[in-house]
Image: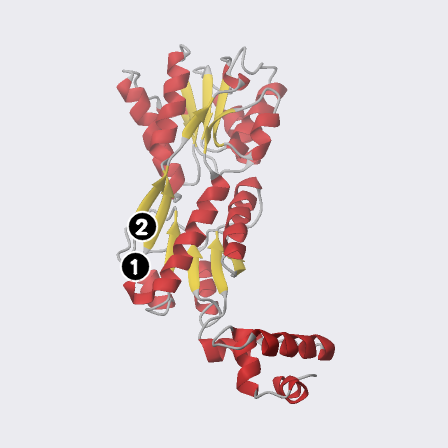
């Protein structure tokens, strides 16, 4: 295997000069740089990432811990993260916690020394978890965690406002029996969307009906089961607000099986506006979240924190949401 010493000998320069070329750590003339790069290409020399990180104290890698790595929502989040990371010369090291506290803490420990910063999306990450599992000077960015963690950057979706928008839209269309398919009980996004749903009903003077609040877990299957449950009783809704688009898709499938037309018999709305939403039949009314931007802004903030070091001042920000009206609610 070709080493940095081989490149230095063939190029007629010192090892330190070769190191400066590949680490970008010091001045080297253009002529010398081109000669070293040509020799390295001829000898097929590849810099050792581990050795370089020991010298520079940087890995050029950002750690990303997500609840899941599948589904259109997380695919879009990762796409935004990857694009932002590439713009700044960083790579992503991805891991999934499966919404398990022990798994997320294990993953945080496993990334020690491998990343320059850590981006986490999990309801289980709080101050105690970070203190116990993350080096004190490692920059951390929390996405949609719901935890009030001091000295850490946070970015969350304005879930409550988005839920109020879509439920208010259903009310304006004349609906009074509006059901909600909730997300997981311990999920920050799900709790905020339920809060927005209830607030919109309250503001319209519509009494809350517990039988119209059905649990889900953000999957198509749970949306399907929830719709089946809603229409098994006597007090059936005229509209369904699913707390994410995947559950809305499942609910629409169940309604077709029950012989109910969307939107003639039942209006359906979702949340997130994943790419598939506009191609459903009928196209889904939903709350638009700039999902890729969520991931990109998380990485951009983390990269700034890495560059500034102790001079960085953490901030707490929200990503705004908008209502996208399509045919699944019967309005134009």
Residue under circle 1? 127
Residue 257 x/y as whole percent: 63, 21
**Residue drawn at point x = 30 percent, y = 59 percent:** 127
Q: Earlier in the sequence, mark 1 or mark 2?
A: 1
Q: Quadrant of residue 6?
A: bottom right
**Relative side of 141 to 232, left or right:** left
What colouring style does the render use?
Answer: secondary structure
Q: Residues within 10 Å of mark 2 (few under 14, many from 20)?
A: some
Res. 105 in view: no
Determine contact: label 1, label 2, CB under 8 Å.
yes
Residue 54 x/y as whole percent: 48, 79
Towards the viewer: 32 or 307 = 32
Residue 282 x/y as whole percent: 59, 19
**Residue 147: mark:** 2
Considering only vertical position in the picture, is 315 above or below 169?
below
Towards the viewer: 113 or 129 = 113
**Relative side of 274 to 128, left or right:** right
């Amino acid at each position: 295997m070709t080493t940095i010493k081989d490149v230095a000998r063939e190029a007629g320069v010192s090892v330190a000069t070769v190191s400066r070329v590949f680490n970008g750590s010091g001045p080297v003339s253009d002529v010398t740089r081109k000669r070293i790069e040509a020799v390295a290409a001829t000898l097929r020399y590849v810099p050792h990432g581990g050795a370089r990180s020991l010298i520079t104290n940087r890995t050029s890698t950002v750690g990303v811990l997500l609840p899941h790595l599948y589904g259109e929502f997380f695919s879009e989040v990762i796409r935004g993260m990857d694009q932002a990371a590439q713009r700044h010369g960083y790579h992503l090291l991805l891991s999934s916690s499966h919404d398990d506290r022990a798994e997320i803490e294990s993953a945080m420990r496993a990334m020690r020394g491998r990343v320059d910063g850590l981006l986490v999306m999990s309801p289980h990450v709080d101050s105690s978890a970070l203190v116990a599992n993350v080096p004190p000077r490692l920059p951390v960015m929390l996405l949609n965690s719901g935890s009030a963690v001091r000295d850490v950057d946070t970015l969350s979706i304005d879930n409550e406002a988005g839920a109020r928008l879509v439920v208010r839209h259903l009310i304006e269309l004349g609906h009074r029996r509006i059901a909600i398919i909730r997300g997981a009980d311990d999920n920050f996004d799900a709790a905020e969307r339920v809060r927005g749903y209830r607030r919109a009903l309250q503001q319209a003077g519509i009494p809350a009906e517990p039988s119209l609040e059905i649990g889900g877990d953000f999957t198509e299957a749970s949306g399907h089961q929830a719709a089946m449950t809603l229409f098994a009783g006597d007090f059936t809704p005229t509209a369904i607000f699913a707390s994410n688009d995947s559950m809305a898709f499942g609910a629409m499938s169940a309604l077709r099986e029950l012989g109910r037309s969307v939107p003639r018999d039942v209006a359906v709305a979702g949340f997130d506006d994943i790419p598939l939403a506009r191609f459903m039949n009928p196209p889904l009314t939903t709350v638009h979240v700039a999902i890729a931007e969520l991931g990109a802004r998380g990485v951009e903030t983390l990269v700034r924190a890495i560059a500034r070091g102790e001079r960085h001042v953490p901030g707490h920000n929200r990503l705004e949401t908008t209502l996208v009206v399509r045919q699944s609610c019967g309005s134009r």
